[in-house]
Amino acid sequence: MASRIMNMKEQLESSLHDTSKPWAKLLQTVEAKTGVDRLYIFIGTVAAVGLWLVFGFAAQLLCNFISFLYPAYISIHAIESPAKDDDTKWLTYWVVFAFFSLLEFFADMIVGWFPLYWLLKCIIFVWLMIPTEFNGSLVIYKKVIKPYFVAHHGAIDSAINRVTATAAKVLEKEN
């Protein structure tokens, strides 16, 4: 267990020092100005955000900001890069993001009764975007969304075709 924790710490330190990541320069600047190691700056920031998501004002806004900002930034980079793999990964994230948004609309009453909702949602969305083999968006897509889609896509396509045909008929009658 201790070796696993040390391995995770080393991976985190490596990521925090990786100059190709957008946060590395900011952490370097803060580390230089404060004299505090960037690992502790990161841990303190995560703790402050966590407390804000439980007790703070506008926790929903902060959670949605975190769930949107980094993925949108990286998605734009993915669109502009010639590689296709990163496009697929981030498109999968946005499909899962939309799926959760729909679920959240119908479960809106839970939000008011569950004080840790925004913290848990933020943790889930961070899991959805982490760049590991256990990326949450890929796991949820492969285990939940894709099987449902494969089982029902014929009926969904048929319904879309019927709606399109009906709309075309209505528009023809109006012209």
Image (spheres, rainbow, N blue to C red):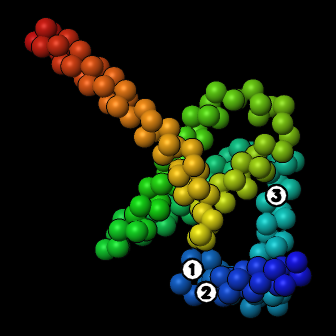
Residue at 75% x, 26% y: name it.
Answer: 109
On screen, residue 106 above or below 82: above
What residue would you read off at disc 1?
21
Quarter holding the N terminus is: bottom right
Which amino acid, by three-letter code, is at mark 2? Answer: Asp
* Residue appearing at x 78%, y 42% in the figure: 117
Alpha carbon distance from label 1 to label 3: 22 Å
Is 103 left, or right, of 52 in this rendering?
A: left
User: Which residue is denoted by mark 2 in the rendering?
Assistant: 18
Residue 163 in the image: state x and y as whole percent. Answer: 29, 20
Marked residue nearer the N-terminal end (1 or 3):
1
Label 3 vs 2, first from the N-terminus? 2
Give the structural element (helix, strand or loop) at label 1: loop
Q: Is 117 positioned to the left or the right of 2 in the image?
A: left
Front-most of residues 136 and 167: 136
The furthest residue to the top:
173
Marks 1/2 in contact by CB < 8 Å: the verdict is yes
Place of residue 105 in the rendered image (x, y in percent of width and height, measured from the top left): 62, 30
Above or below for 171 versus 106? above
Give the number of the disc on residue 50. 3
Q: Secondary structure at mark 3?
A: helix
Residue 50 falls in image quadrant: bottom right
Category of crowding for the residue at label 3, using alpha-carbon neighbours closer than 10 angstroms: few (below 14), some (14–19), many (at least 20): many
- Spatial CA span between label 3 and label 2: 24 Å
**Alpha-carbon span between mark 1 and mark 2:** 6 Å
Above-or-below relation of 100 to 157: below
Q: Quick one: quadrant of the C terminus?
A: top left
Q: Callout 3, which amino acid?
A: Gly
- Find numbered disc 2 in the image and state the secondary structure of the residue it sits on: loop
Q: Residues within 10 Å of mark 2 (few under 14, many from 20)?
A: few
At label 1, which amino acid type do we have?
A: Lys
